[in-house]
Image (cartoon, rainbow, N blue to C red):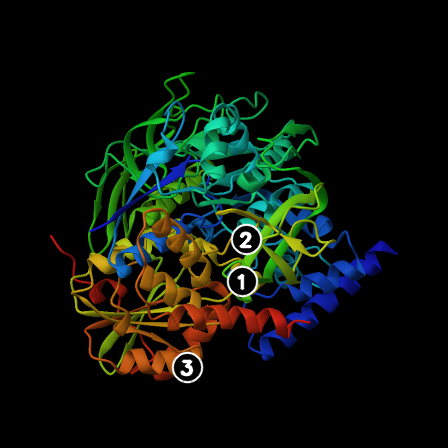
Amino acid sequence: MAEFIIAHMYPDLMNLYGDRGNLLCLRKRLQWYGYQSYINEISFASKPDYHNVDMIFMGGGSDREVKLIYQDLISKGADLKKAMEDGIPMLFIDSAYQLLGQAYMDADENLIDGLGFFKFSTLRAKNRLTGNIILNSTITGKECTVVGFENHYGCTYFQDDNLQPFGRVLKGFGNNGEDGYEGLIYKNLIGTYLHGPLLPKNPEIADFFIKAMAERRGITVKSGLDDSIEHFAHNQVKDKILARS
Amino acid sequence: MNRIRLMLAILAGKTFIIISRLLGNQGSSFPGKIARRIYPAVLMELAAQVKGKIIVITGTNGKTTTSNMVARIINESNATLIHNQSGANMIPGITTAFIEKSGLTGRKKFEYALLETDEAHVPLLLKELNPSLLLITNFFSDQLDRFGELDNIIKKIKAAVNNREIDLLLNADDPLTAHFHDLTSLRRYYFGFTATSYDSYDSQESREGRYCIICGQKLEYQRYHYAGLGKFNCPECGNHNPELNFTGHNLVMASHIELMVDNIKITSPYQGFDNAYNIIAAVATARILGINEQDIQKGIADYQPQAGRMETFYINGRPAVLILVKNPTGLNQSLNTVIQDISLKNLFFALNDNQGDGRDISWIWDADIEVIEEEQHRIKQVVCSGWRSGDMALRVKYAGYPVERIAIKSNLKEAIEHITSLESEVVYLFSTYSALFKCRKILERMSDVRDRKPEAESMRSEG
C-alpha cells in the first residue's frame, strides 16, 4: 500500500482558526482512498529533504508567531522554492501565504521582506477583513465554488500580471477587497486567506492535492468518495453567504 | 440637569428591562444600551453607589461559573450586591445590571459589585469605574474572530490596569499571566494547584501559551493539570510559575469535587478540572474580600450547576445533560468529562455562528473530537444541529466516527426530539451560546418533572 508523507511546517506555532483541520482532512481522505499517510513535523533547526515528502503544509499564525518562525523559514527558503518548482503540492494559509511574496507589513506597520517567490506584496488594512467568503475557482479543471472564512488585516496586491489567483471572489474580500482576486495558484501550490478550515468543506480542493500527490508517484486514485456530508456543509454555508446580499 | 438625565436613563432602562422580561429574554444588554444613549455617564454614576468593593472577573473560561460562585458566597455573608448574570458581560449588559438594582434616583447603597466582563471589554469598563480587584481566570484561544489575537487583548488589559489601585488575582498555572509579572505598581495574588493525581505529562491540546511570553522559547512542563495550565518553566530565561498565595491541594474529582484551598475544606456538586479552577478562584476572591470560612464553604457547597453547565433534564426517565461550549478548551474538557461516563450514550451538538457564538466556527477543528471515535462503542448516535450543522457533522466524520451513525437535523426541536427518542441510557447535548436557551426551553417542555434531580446522580464514573 502506498504511503504518503505530508510535511507540516511549524505545527505548534502556525495554526490559526483550525488550520490543522486541513491535515485531518487530507489524512482521512487518503485513508478512505486506501492509502496510508504520515505527518513529518518540521520545526526549528530541522533540515528536511523536501523531495522525500509528498506535500508541504503551513497554516496561519499571529504576528507574534510569525516573528518567532521568520528567521528559520527564510533559511529554508531556497529548498522550499526548489520543491515548489518541482511541483510538490503545497498549501500555505493566511500569514504563511503572505510570506511567499516580496514583502508584508507587520502589526507595527514595518515592511518585512518575504520569501520572494512571487511578485506580490501585502499591506495592512485599517479594519480586519473578516467573514464568510465564497469564490469561484477553476483549478480542478472545471468551475467550482470554494467556501471558507477569512480573517486578516493583510491586503495582498499582485505586482505581476502573470500571477494566477486561486479563485475569484463572489462574496467576501479576498486578497485585498478591491480586485476580486483571492489567493494564488502556481503549479501545485495554493496560497490563500481561507480558513474554515479550507479542505473539509471543499473536497474538490482536497482531492486536487491528493491527485497531485498521487500523480507524482505514478498512482491513479480510484473513483470518488461519498461526499454527501461535505456537500451539505458546503451548500449550507454557501446559501447563507449568498442569502446575505 | 444631569440629575434629570440620570433619572430618565434609569427609568428608560427599567422600562426596557420589564419589556424584555415579558418577551422572555435572558440577561439583556438592550436596556443598558438605551440608558447609555440617554445619559452616557449612567454607569459611571451608578457605580458610585458601591460603598465597598467592585470586583471584575474576566478570562477566557470559567468567568460565569466563578462569578456565580462568588455571588453565592457574598449572599451567604448577607452583603448587598450588584451582579450581572447569564452572559450579559459587555458594557451595556453591565449597565443593565446596575440599573436593575438601582432605585429611580440612583442613590441606593451596595457593599459589592461583581462584574463578569468579556476580556475585550475590560479596558473600556475600567474607564468608567474603579474596581479594587480584577480576577483573571485564564487565557485560552477563544472567539478570535471578534477581537483579534489573544496577545492584543492581554496587552490592552495590562495597559488599562497599569498605575491604578487595582489588585490582581491571577492563575499561577497559566503561563500567559506572566504578562503581568512586571507591573510594579500593583499588588498581585496568585492561585493554583500543587501536584494532583489527575495531572498528565504531555498535552495534545490547544497550543496557546506554550511559548514563553518573555523570550519566545518553548516552555517545559513538569506536569499539566488541564489544557495549558500546569507547572512550567522556561529553559531560556527561567520564567516559571509564580509563588502561590492560594494553594489548591488534595483534589478529589468523582461525581462531585472535593479539595483543600490552603486549610479550608471545600466540597462542590460540580465536576471536572475546569471547575476545580473556578472553585479555587472563587475561594481566593472571597478570602481577599475578608469573608469567613463558613460562608465560603456553604456558598460553594450550595451552588448547583446552572443553565448549560451540566444541567440535567429527565425525559421518559432518562437523563439529558445540557452543556454550553464555546471554544476548543471548554469542548475538550466537557468531552473528557462525558467519556468518563461509561453509560450507553447519544450525543447532540448544536453549532451556531451568530455574533454571540463567534462567526467563525473553525474552532471545532482545534478541539480533540477524536475522543468520540475512541469511545464509539458507547456512543450510539451523534445528531448535529444548528445553523452550521453541516460543519459539525463533518468534524465528527473526520474524527473517524462511523458516518452511518451521524445524523444532520438543522432544526433544534426536531433534532432534540430525535436524539432523545433513540435508545440510550443518557443523552449529552452540547450547544453554543445562541442555541443554548432554545435547547433549554425545548428540554424543559419535554421534561418529566419540573424539579430536577441532583446532577451528580446522572453520571456513573469509571474507577
Q: Nearer the viewer, residue B40 or B72?
A: B40
Q: Are marks 1 and 2 on the same chain?
A: yes
For marks 3 and 2, give the CA distance.
33 Å
Residue most toward the right?
A: B1
Mark 3: which secondary structure?
helix
The residue labelled by disc 2 is: A194
Asked if the residue at tag 2 contacts the one at tag 1, i.e. Cβ–Cβ closer than 8 Å, the answer is yes
Mark 3 crowd level (few <14, some 14–19, many ≥20, 10 Å Cα): some
Look at the picture and state if B185 lies above or below B293. above
Q: Are marks 3 and 2 on the same chain?
A: no
Mark 1: which secondary structure?
strand
Mark 2: which secondary structure?
loop
The residue labelled by disc 1 is: A146
Counting from the top left corner in percent of width and height, residue B199 is at 24, 38
Counting from the top left corner in percent of width and height, residue B365 is at 40, 54
Please report the residue visible at 43 percent of the width from the left and 39 percent of the height from the top.
B208
